[in-house]
């Protein structure tokens, strides 16, 4: 089986979990692994009320390229059998991922991330967008079980609640 496995990356723990799953799928399918990082300029870009000057757009693009290189370097270390290709795309994450897919023979891998009520109200779900618009199969990868524990520790720290380390060793 050939084709491509396309995965979104932003450096979050959820996207790293999705990248690990995408690498496993690429190895199993003997497919290319494409890692896509979407970026948007501040203020909405050209044509918007707060559009950016070209130097700001260039700086944003360079920052996105540098971030993707860092993600690929960290991910590729010690990963035999998979050579990921990176792609930075200006646009929203969902649309960038769907546009990166070539045809129905590809596989799109997305992390589901945390969907707390406040986040649902502020940001649309990239996974839902991809499931609704992708012309190929979409694999939605849930967050690592360790992510829930990490989020709980962060909440306790934010509220200055005591932390019992025995809770972490369930």
Image (spheres, rainbow, N blue to C red):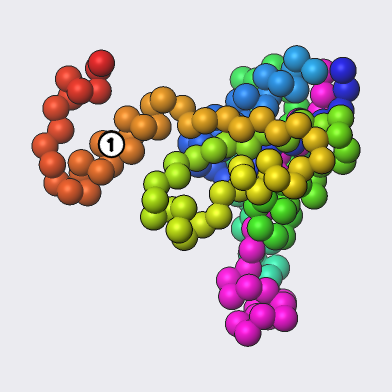
Does the image show residue 56? no
Where 120 sits versus 102, above or below? below
At which x and y percent is residue 91? 70, 60
Residue 92 x, y percent position in the rendering: 66, 58
Residue 110 as seen in the image, left or right of residue 98: left
Image point (62%, 20%), residue name: 78
Q: From what the image shows, is residue 79 above or below residue 136? A: above
Q: Indicate yes or no whether the magenta region holds residue 52.
A: yes
Q: Assess whether residue 169 is covered by the magenta stretch.
A: no
Relative placement, left or right, of 143 versus 139 is: left
The quarter of the displayed image where residue 132 is located? top right
The residue range painted magenta reads 30-55
Residue bearing the label numbered 1: 152
| Secondary structure beneath label 1 | helix
Q: Position of residue 104 (x, y in %)?
A: 86, 34
Where residue 45 appears, as percent x and y from the top left, is 67, 74
At 68% from the left and 41% from the top, the residue drawn is: 131
Residue at image location 72% in from the left, 60% down from the top: 90
Query: Relative to residue 7, is residue 17 drawn left or right?
Result: left
Of all residues shown, which one is farthest toward the front? 132
- Which image quarter is the N terminus in? top right
Q: Residues within 10 Å of mark 1 (few under 14, many from 20)?
A: some
Most foreground residue, 37 or 59: 37
Residue drawn at the location 63% of the way across and 84% of the way down: 49
Which of 137 and 153 lies nearest the eye of the viewer?
A: 137
Which residue is nearer to you in this view: 166 or 59? 166
């Amino acid at each position: 089986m050939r084709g491509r496995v396309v995965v979104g990356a932003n450096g979050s723990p959820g996207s790293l979990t999705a990248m690990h799953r995408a690498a496993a799928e690429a190895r199993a399918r003997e497919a290319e692994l494409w890692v896509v990082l979407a970026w948007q300029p501040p203020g909405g870009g050209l044509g918007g009320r707060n559009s950016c000057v070209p130097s700001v757009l260039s700086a944003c693009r360079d920052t996105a390229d540098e971030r993707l290189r860092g993600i690929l370097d960290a991910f590729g270390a010690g990963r035999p059998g998979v050579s990921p290709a990176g792609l930075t795309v200006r646009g929203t994450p969902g649309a960038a991922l769907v546009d990166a897919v070539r045809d129905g023979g590809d596989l799109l891998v997305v992390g589901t991330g945390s969907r707390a009520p406040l986040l649902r109200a502020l940001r649309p779900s990239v996974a839902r967008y991809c499931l609704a618009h992708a012309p190929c199969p979409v694999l939605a990868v849930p967050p690592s079980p360790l992510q829930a524990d990490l989020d709980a520790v962060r909440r306790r720290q934010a509220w200055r609640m005591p932390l019992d380390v025995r809770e972490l060793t369930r």
